[in-house]
Amino acid sequence: MSKTPRISFEFFPPQTLDASFRLWETVQALAPMRPDFVSVTYGAGGTTRKLTHDAVSTIGRNYGLNVAAHLTCVSATRSETLEIAEAYADAGVTEIVALRGDAPKGADRFVPHPDGFASSVDLVAALARTGKFKIRVGAYPEPHPDAADSLADVTWLKRKIDAGASSAITQFFFDADTYFRFRDACLAARIIAPIIPGILPITSWDGAKRFAARCGTRVPTKLDEAFATAARDGRAELLALAQCTALCDRLLQGGVEDLHFYTLNRPHLTREVVRALGITPEVVLEKVA
């Protein structure tokens, strides 16, 4: 096993009471693993804007975690978007994950607001000018659905780094070589900022495949066959743990120092993978009379 990595987690804001309980249970389960930071997503089309702000504020205040708030260009003017960033700063947030964002529900593709940011590059540049945030951005080791060609994602990432981003978090992938090829292409393009692999612990293989289809992630045939067999044998959870741990270990062997886990607000598998990588929860001793 390679050296212990720095880790981070992604959560999404709750839209129902049950989802709210699940989020806080997830945060409580994973906070003791001492993440470098946690991020909170923005719903498609900016639909969870207030919920994201509330979740970011609560996690930072109640759990003492370094929270990176997502911010997108979707369905808002420039001034509205920067007002949201200012509200994050007022809440003590010092990191933002700046993204273009997905198209609003019912739309086929992203169309900038007439008075909004045209791209994540413009958003990053505006945030950088405030001088208030460490800015992280997204990266795509497999072609983004809107990418013109295989090199477009490297070109866009370089533009975002040059605009003021300090690191990138990748979309999830199932094959470590996918990440290594992308990292090599980025180095060839003189991108030296850290590119953190995004890891999806597979709590539902059918769900993971649907997710992959939406974001252009290739599903290896052998992995699909393995999960089909494991499901029949009642070993899907064991396979998910082994698959995710092996992927992380391969990345660490290849020189990766940071791992970002897409938890989907389901902490159990993420926690088990992190423990398998040698990270143990911090034990807080209560004062006793």
Image (tube, grey):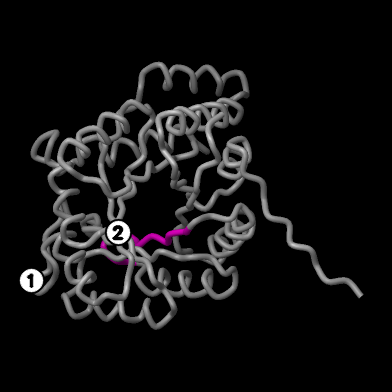
Q: Secondary structure at mark 1?
A: loop
Q: Residue at x 30, y 34 (%)?
A: 217
Amino acid under disc 2: Ala
Question: Taking the image as drawn, is residue 15 in sight?
Answer: no
Tell me which label, 2 or 1, sits earlier in the chain: 2
Q: Is residue 50 above or below residue 282?
A: below
* Mark 1 lies on residue: 114
Q: What residue sits 44% from the left and 17% below the top?
A: 225
Q: Residue at x 56, y 20 (%)?
A: 230
User: In terms of depth relative to the viewer, which is nearer, 85 or 183?
Assistant: 183
| Residue 1 to residue 271: above or below | above
Chain part drawn in magenta? 37-47
> Are the residues flagged by discs 2 and 1 in contact, CB closer than 8 Å?
no
- Number of residues whose C-alpha sits closer than 10 Å to that of mark 2, classed few (under 14), some (14–19) or many (20 or more): some
Q: Residue 150 has which mark?
A: none
Q: Nearer the viewer, residue 73 or 9?
A: 9
Residue 44's tag is 2
Work out whether residue 81 can be spotted: yes
| Left/right of residue 98 with respect to residue 260 in the rendered view | left
Q: Of the residues shown, which amino acid type is indicated by label 1?
A: Pro
